[in-house]
Amino acid sequence: MIPDEVDLLLADENNHYCPPIKGKVRSGYSFRRTREHQGIDVPLSTGDTIKAAFDGVVRYVGFTKQTGGYGNLVIIRHTNGLETYYGHLSKHLCTVNEVVKAGDVIGLGGSTGRSTGPHLHFEARYKGQTFDPSRLIDFETGNLRDSLLTLKKHYYSIYSHYGQSDEESIAASSRIVYSIKSGDTLGRVAQKYGTTVTAICRLNSISSKKLLRIGERIIVR
Ligand SMILES: [Zn+2]
């Protein structure tokens, strides 16, 4: 069961935090072209050290052939139930069931898996559900946003992200997404959903002249 709201203690005198990496987020938690990007990407140099964000236990250590897009991946389970994912590593430096402290080096950054250049793909999950990791960490400064995170159900939507008000996040999470089929035009899709081409274009930040590709997903409402 996914609770409507849960308070996650992130840091206090007994629970530690360390930035897994510091840097500007290049690609955020969002729907990217045709697939969900369920974490954030921070560019790095291959071999940069990647650290455990919080105290916990290593739950998974996988290689590209098992993880596919993630490349070499480490997943850490934290005491508050949160899990953090560290993808595209060039090397693992931890083993399954190893107890780690925040700041322990768990791997080296790289570009394994589905990656166009060295970066860390960092994900945060609660009960298997992803949410925007920028709700936890300001990656540019490396600081925690707060010592406590109130995780709300609507945060698990790929359209919900840090910086939105609760109203915006709720609206975003209840969006209707349509997958383009052969023969579709924006006009036809708008008619089908009782909306207008202008409204669809505004929601997707696209031009009304945009060429639609089959399988492409657009927000209709
Ligand atoms: Zn990524």
Image (cartoon, grey):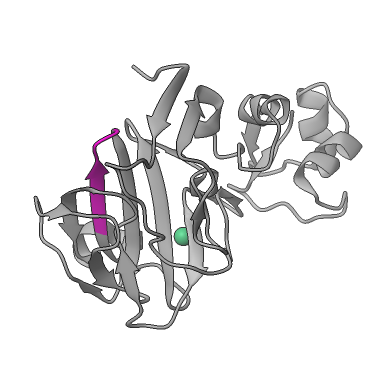
Magenta span includes 78: yes
Magenta span includes 203: no
Nearer the observer, 164 or 156: 164
**214 lies above or below 170:** below
Residue 27, percent from left and from top: 57, 61
Indicate left or right for 175 with 76 as reference. right
Q: Residue at x 56, y 63 (%)?
A: 141
Residue 100, percent from left and from top: 18, 55
Residue 193, percent from left and from top: 76, 23
**45 lies above or below 75:** below
Q: How many marks?
A: 0
Q: Which secondary structure type mostly characterizes the magenta part of the structure?
A: strand
Q: Residue at x 47, y 16 (%)?
A: 4
Q: Is residue 85 visible?
A: yes
Which quadrant would the N terminus be assigned to in this image? top left
Which quadrant would the C terminus be assigned to in this image? top right
Residue range of the region highlighted in magenta in the rendering: 74-80
Q: Residue at x 41, y 17 (%)?
A: 3
Q: Is residue 112 visible?
A: no
